[in-house]
Image (cartoon, rainbow, N blue to C red):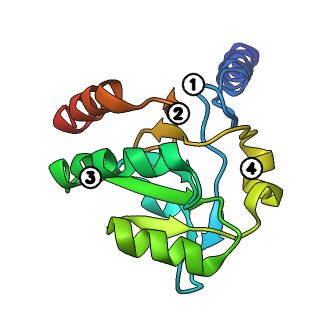
Amino acid sequence: MKRIFFGLTFLVCFYTSSNAQTEGLEIGDITPDIDLPDSKGNEVSLSSLRGSVILVDFWASWCGPCLKEQPELIKLYQNYPKNFSIYGVSLDSKKALWLGAMAKLKQPWTQVSDLKLWNSPVVVNYKIQAIPFNLLIDKNGIILAKNIHGEKLNELVKTLVENK
């Protein structure tokens, strides 16, 4: 009887561990953590926002398409003050330009940057080749969508937040 019990326990553990989610960049993966300084120099990790749906938005003050999409992100953020967060990751290299763009755009969400532009480890870890780029992740850090913008983003966030 003990052999059967231990055999079944082993099979359950093996099956569970072989199907565990992994950290990665594909839909269904757990998002790799990001831990960068905010505009005041305080380290803010992406994982600290878990518990809500999060849009990880990679952008920069010099990126025209990024700036063009910010008003829509502000509306989205304001429409769902609970259960939705944005974690902005700037690929700027000059703090004054980054801070100026944040002030001009009046972005109310968490903004971080190491001011290393394309040399940032985050760019390498997330395999970013162009911006704007984003990831939509659930309350557990699991990637739900990649590079989603406009109405598709609005509808998906609405569905996720309202069904929470």
Task: Measuring from the top left, give residue 129's x and y in whole percent.
Answer: 73, 37
- Is the residue under label 1 in contact with that under label 4 (CB below 8 Å)? no
Quadrant in the rendering for residue 55: top left
State how far apart marks 2 and 4 are (Cα): 17 Å
Neighbours of disc 2 within 10 Å: few (<14), some (14-19), many (20+): many
Mark sitting on residue 95: none
Q: Which residue is mark 1?
A: 27
Instruction: Check the picture and name the quadrant holding the C terminus.
Output: top left
- In this rendering, the answer to whether 162 lies above or below 45 is above
Decide which of tag 1 and tag 2 comes sooner along the chain. 1
Decide which of tag 4 and tag 3 comes sooner along the chain. 3
Q: Which residue is mark 2?
A: 143
Neighbours of disc 3 within 10 Å: few (<14), some (14-19), many (20+): many
Q: Which residue is mark 3?
A: 77
- Is the residue under label 2 in contact with that under label 3 (CB below 8 Å)? no
The residue furthest bottom is 40
State how far apart marks 4 and 3 are (Cα): 24 Å
